[in-house]
Amino acid sequence: MAEAGQVVESIPQERLTRRGLRDETLLVLALSLGASGVSALISFIGSVTRPGGLKDQAATLNASAAPGRPWLDLAWQLFGIATALVPVALVAHLLLREGRSLRVLGFDRAQPGRDLLRGAVIAAVIGSSGIAFYLAARGLGFNLTVVPEALPDVYWKYPVLILSALQNSVLEEVIVVGYLLRRLDQLGWTPRSSLVAASVLRGSYHLYQGVGGFIGNMVMGVVFVLLYRRWGRVGPLVVAHSLLDIGAFVGYALLAGKVSWLPTA
């Protein structure tokens, strides 16, 4: 990982000035999760100013894009997943200008077994505590009822839910952890300041779920940043996030309305 202020010799120096790095980072975030944070804030304001409590409102993920038209719906679902990954392709392109690749962020197949094992352990720890925190936050009125999926019962439902989970994981971990921390390091931010920025950003684009969603994901962000600093790889984080989202999306589809402890809209 490049040290703060270090200039990579493989591209012209003017492209890696402090201002250039700052503007590049802001543009990447504006095209991806920074914009999602602003959208989530507007959604949250709408929820808290609406009559009734937060837990009586629903935040729906993976909803149908064309009800009653499964083939068109599938096309929209795949289109949304593919276009959401464009910022990751942009980050890969920007790293290539440095003579680097996504490998410098630890997003590669160099350690598949270790990444899978670490990711599974992280998911097991965070998943169990995350469910308990969500139920408590909703019960206290700090969170909306999260509906992880509302797709029709068609043959492509579960593959799309899995692809959606993978897309979320790659997008968030590559940009919010790997790319953002690298750029903030190059801009001379302290590790503590970078940790706060990345964690607050992660919490911000989950604010549409309520205060509980913001706090819970911010804490998750702290854990992920610390693990990334220790391992230097986003691979285990992508695995962990994928398992968490697959569990949430597919688990909800299988259990909603069948178990009493799982809130539904």
Image (cartoon, rainbow, N blue to C red):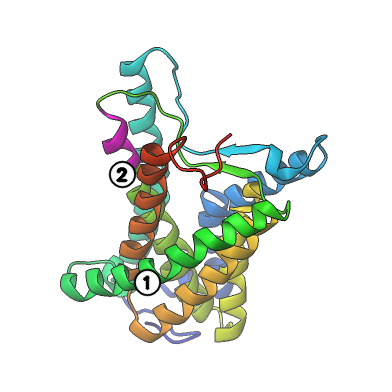
Task: Pick the residue in front: 110 or 263.
Answer: 263
Residue 179 visible somewhere in the drawing: yes
For the residues bearing labels 1 and 2, Cβ distance under 8 angstroms = no
Residue 162, how many percent across, how many down? 31, 44
Going 44% across and 18% down the picture, which residue do you hit? 66
The tag on residue 162 is 2
Dot 1: element: helix
Q: Earlier in the sequence, mark 1 or mark 2?
A: 1
Name the residue nearer the viewer: 183 or 152.
Answer: 152
Residue 198 against residue 90 in the figure, above or below: below
- Residue at (51, 45) in percent of width and height: 262
Amino acid type, label 2:
Ile
Q: In screen coordinates, is 7 left or right of 54?
A: left
* The N terminus, quarter of image: bottom left
> Magenta segment range?
156-161
User: Which residue corresponds to mark 1?
Assistant: 122
Name the quadrant of the C terminus. Answer: top right
**Residue type marked 1:** Ile
> Which percent across, then down, holds residue 263?
56, 43
Q: Is residue 176 magenta?
A: no
* Label 1 Cα crowd, 10 Å radius (few <14 / some 14-19 / many 20+): many
Q: Nearer the viewer, residue 114 or 188?
A: 114
